[in-house]
Amino acid sequence: MDLLKEKIKKDGTVLPGNVLKVDNFLNHQVDAKLMDQIGEEFARLFKDEKITKVVTVESSGIAPALTTAIHLGVPLIFARKHKSVTLTDDLYTAKVYSYTKKVSNNISIDKRFLNADDHILIIDDFLANGQAVQGLLEIAKLADVSVSGIGIVIEKSFQKGHAMIEKTGIRLESLARITSLKDQSVTFVE
Ligand code: 5GP
């Protein structure tokens, strides 16, 4: 998506630790029009997969996941984060280590919202080491739902997540793929 790449080049800042800061259009202030175009693109890419629900993790995944759900005409479910182990029989839960916050959270989805006949599309803002996606895949397994695809807004292809997803055989579509953040400069995969 050229529009997204231009926006990253123009407004993104590279922070230490291979972190790309995009809080002026994705992670804090949200460019609503761009989010709508992102949702439209994911819906176009996954239109033949018979998706029944879009699933993400709060909070940064919600904006692109919501516009995708609107364009696919299906509900959005966002897994909720909580630190304490409030084990409830009513929840599917997985543990996720946060790349940017360096803490582990439990993420949960209420059992009422996932059914065995669901075909879910996982959407997230970033793919780094793949922990967030891995947590959602664990929840999908617990719920016995099939994962029809994974859509990522910004993939840092030089980190472990891409290879991890490739091994699962699940279709992965990333709208911007970054090959390097060296010298505070963003380089995209050709
Ligand atoms: P992973 O679980 O794949 O290691 O990391 C993905 C999650 O960490 C994303 O949901 C995102 O919130 C956060 N994240 C990872 N890398 C970056 C980054 O470079 N910039 C920002 N803003 N968030 C990131």
Image: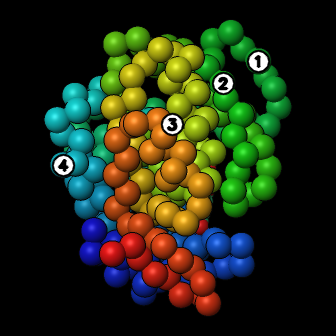
Q: Give the CA separation, mark 4 to mark 1.
A: 38 Å
Marks counted in the figure total 4
Q: Residue at x 58, y 73 (%)?
A: 20
Residue 14 in sight in this render: yes
Q: Give the CA separation, mark 4 to mark 2.
A: 30 Å
In the rendered image, which quarter contains the N terminus? bottom left
Q: Secondary structure at mark 2?
A: strand
| Nearest to N terminus: mark 1 or mark 3 | 3
Q: Give the CA separation, mark 2 to mark 1.
A: 8 Å
Quadrant in which residue 82 is drawn: top right
Quadrant in which residue 102 is drawn: bottom right
What label sits on residue 78 in the rendered view? 3
Nearer to us of marks 4 and 3 is 4
The residue pinned by badge 4 equals 44
Q: Residue 68's x, y, as percent?
A: 31, 46
Q: Secondary structure at mark 1?
A: loop
Quadrant hosting ligand 1: bottom right
Mark 3 nearby-residue class (10 Å; few <14, some 14–19, many ≥20): many
In this view, the residue in front, 29 or 89, is 89
Q: Residue 11's x, y, as percent?
A: 47, 83
Q: Residue 78's x, y, as percent?
A: 51, 36
Q: Amino acid at mark 3?
A: Phe
Nearer to us of marks 2 and 3 is 2
| Nearest to N terminus: mark 4 or mark 2 | 4
Q: Is the shortest distance between ligand 1 and the CB of mark 2 under 8 Å? A: no
The residue pinned by badge 2 equals 93
The residue pinned by badge 1 equals 87
Q: Give the CA separation, mark 4 to mark 3.
A: 21 Å
